[in-house]
Image (cartoon, grey):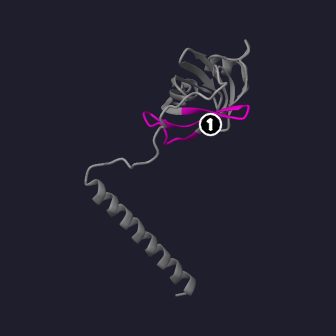
Amino acid sequence: MSIELESYKNEVVMRRRDILKFGLGALMTCGVVACKSAGPTVPEPASLPAGVGSLSGVWYSPQFEQMYIRQIGDEVRGIYTYKYGGTFEGKIVGNLIKFKWIDPGDPDVARRTFKGEGYWQVVKEGDRIFLKGAWGYNDDVMAGGPWEAEYIRELEDSDPSTVEEYRDNEVR
């Protein structure tokens, strides 16, 4: 047997031992029933940054492309344009927005609906305003990954307010 192959086999055996050790450690810590790991949590609300008024406007998200947000009081509603678009709605408390999102799918092309939750913190860096947070599927607010956006401009009358308006005006 070559030295390279022997080295590879030893590495595989070591990785299996590490996996078993971690798995048994988790089982002993949590017992036989399932447990949640103590991972990141949604931050507590703080004061809204000075100079930030309404969050209504067009935002750009590297993850979900254009976002059109409309704020009325402490509630926000909007759409995002990633792929075929989706909606979100949430509530603002201080600098924190907790929201639910829906990608409504499309029965005409057999694409199912997806739902989830998420959060954003409103952050001001110099003259720029950002939403920094995360999203997840169903009632998980983080496991999907980051969801960030930067304020671009005020809303215009021609900006879409529904996914249907967005889909009707865009080329797929």
> Between residues 92 and 137, which one lies in front from this camera angle?
92
Q: Residue at x 50, y 31 (%)?
A: 45
**Residue farthest to the top, as pictured:** 157
Q: x, y (%) of residue 66?
A: 68, 29
Residue 152 sits inside the magenta stretch: no
Screen quadrant of the C terminus: top right
Label 1: how many residues lie within 10 Å, few (<14), some (14-19) or many (20+)?
many
Residue under numbered circle 1: 148
The image quadrant that residue 105 belongs to is top right
Tell me which amino acid carries mark 1: Glu
Q: In the picture shown, does residue 132 fall above or below 104?
A: below
The image quadrant that residue 56 belongs to is top right
Q: x, y (%) of residue 38?
A: 40, 48
Q: In the picture shown, does residue 169 fall above or below 45?
A: above
Q: In the picture shown, does residue 59 fall above or below 16?
A: above
Q: Residue at x 42, y 33 (%)?
A: 139
> Between residues 94 and 16, which one lies in front from this camera angle?
94
Q: x, y (%) of residue 6?
A: 51, 83
Residues in magenta, as a range: 120-146
